[in-house]
Image (cartoon, rainbow, N blue to C red):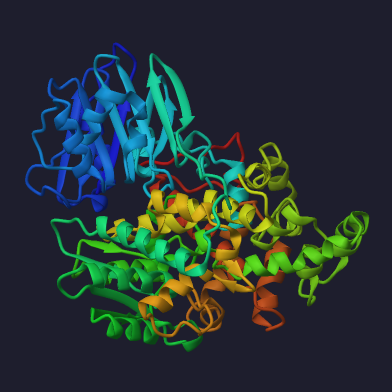
Amino acid sequence: MCGIAGIVGSQHETVDFSEVRRMCQTIVHRGPDDEGIYAKGPVGLGMRRLSIIDLGGGRQPIHNEDQSVWVVFNGEIYNFPELRRELEDRGHKFYTRSDTEVIVHLYEDLGADCVRKLRGMFAIALYDERRQSLLLARDRLGKKPLHYAFDRGRLLFGSEIKTILAAAPDLTELNPEALMQFFTFGYIADPNTAFRKIEKLAPGHVLEYSGGTVKISEYWDLPAYGSDDPKNESECIAELEERLAEAVRIRLISDVPLGALLSGGIDSSVVVALMARASTKPVKTFSIGFSKQDFNESEHARAVAAKFGTEHYEFVVEPDIEEVLGKLIPMMEEPFGDSSMVPTYYVSKMARQHVTVALSGDGGDELFAGYDRYPVHLARQNYERIPSWIGKLFRRHLYPKLDPAARGRRFGFNVSLRGRDRYLDSISYLPGRGRERSLFSEDFLEWSNQSTDPQDSYRRYFDEAPAADRLSRLLYVDTKTYLTADVLAKVDRMSMANSLEVRCPILDHVFVEWVTGLSSRWKLHHGTRKYALRQLAKRLGVPGLDRPKQGFAMPLKHWWRSELNHMLEILVEPRTLQRGYFDPNAVRALVNEHQSGRRDRPTDLWLLLIFELWHRNFLEARSSNAFPTRSWRTDQPVQVEV
């Protein structure tokens, strides 16, 4: 596990070693153990290493036998022992015991198709001296990040946006589609970043760069949903157990201490149960709790730990929000509104005191239909009987006149929409092109309207999903967007901030392909979410399965009236309102609505706070001059110095 960065310049350029090193220095937290740089002619590859496998001999960059192919790599390849044996049988010579080295030899045999053979999580940068070409590749589900940009004839890449800004600090023109995507969904989906000239390589894609020409292609996508329906429940659960147990087992390979993040929910509890069965000594487990009991799952995690005999550690989170956000916002590099990044940061910090690698239960909700919104959306299909013209009439003429605090206002808007758009509205917070248009300034809306509608890619995923039934289409949309750009981005950034590697067995791509193929009835069964996984949990003896789902989130609705209350002032300060994104009166009304107790809108307020703190802690903190108001204008790009 590590962070990577690099440059490919023009043919006659010589990349400076120190420039690549400067890029790597921005991500020391991702790899505190070592640094490696390859700089030759127009190419520079760099990495920061967190040593997991082959501690002494696995230094990167790694090369092939004649040193014509070089690679830097972030991630883990779990099937590398089998791949190594196959490659050695074909005559390849290895000089390390690391998983990284299989990549260069696979590339020699297969070219860019080598990534199809890899089972794991990865962001890869590989340079072929003979062909003078660079290959960038990202794993199938997007567990590891990879960004790239073009600047003055050079291709820049890195695990984090900071690496690119270290080499090209002027690539900071803000991206209107990305900002509106943040306000709508609370995160910025691939391939967007907050900056117009910097992109994320999408999961399951490779980028080939040679002679100034770029070719991006998809090498993997989710297979057809519902293509397999086991004969009976016993057969289905038995195969589920066998496949998930294997995904867990191959993730126990490590030369450093290993444990598990245990929330007490079904997903992480099943992973811990299978870890305990495969381990010869007690598994180390880590959980956090809150003093607000309606958000506290620590007692359930404690019960699971006792059941499976783990060495359990727990911590009650009572954070100094200002202090912790001051640390986290700069790490995120772009606005990110998932408040569970705070508990994720704390549990990662606690785990890192004892282990270097931890398994998690991420992915269960997207694969097995675990979110409340799925049955809610399916139930609301009944409203599609309402003629569409009535819905349009309501949205256009009646909705804008309703008091923003009126009960049922959002519900009415939602059920007035048709299927696909109704679901997108249900997962939206502040959609500036629709329901919450009045919150934003006309100038900002005019500027953002020059870009693509932030919901367009979601609509495309829904329409093109390899699925016939409505539930499977929703799972496909969330797997391609929310899972990658929110859940996995959060886990990667918060764990790497603490130099902790997190592995997700439920998101093993071989396992994912099998689950995707299962009929929907094994996921949502007569109103029971995650049906098959829940049945496996029962079979394994996981306690407390009948309790309601809580989720791994902060008690925002409580904290806004206590620890966070004074931070509401930030939202109405002239410094905030003069940026020009929002209608000042609408923001003041939103804050007053909350303070008066007329209505709780904790997530909306959180998004506004995070956005402003991103401006201050990431953008302004890196600028030598006072940050200009209305900095989103295309004729006033933000100048950031790193």
- Quadrant in the picture for the C terminus: top left
State how many labels appear.
0
* Percent of width and height locating residue 412: 81, 68
Q: Residue at x 40, y 24 (%)?
A: 208
* Percent of width and height locating residue 545: 46, 82
Dividing the picture into quarters, in which one does residue 88 lie? Answer: top left
| Residue, far front | 231
* 22 relative position to 511: left or right: left
* Percent of width and height locating residue 120: 32, 47
* Percent of width and height locating residue 194: 51, 45
> Does the image show residue 615?
no
Q: Residue at x 32, y 24 (%)?
A: 111
The residue closer to the viewer here, 393 or 336, is 393
The residue closer to the viewer here, 632 or 428, is 428
The residue closer to the viewer here, 491 or 470, is 470
* 283 relative position to 139: left or right: left
> Does the image show residue 135?
yes
Q: Residue at x 22, y 59 (%)?
A: 252
Task: Note whether 369 is above or below 550 in the view shown.
Answer: above
Task: Note whether 407 is above or below 366 in the view shown.
Answer: below
Dividing the picture into quarters, in which one does residue 280 lie? Answer: bottom left
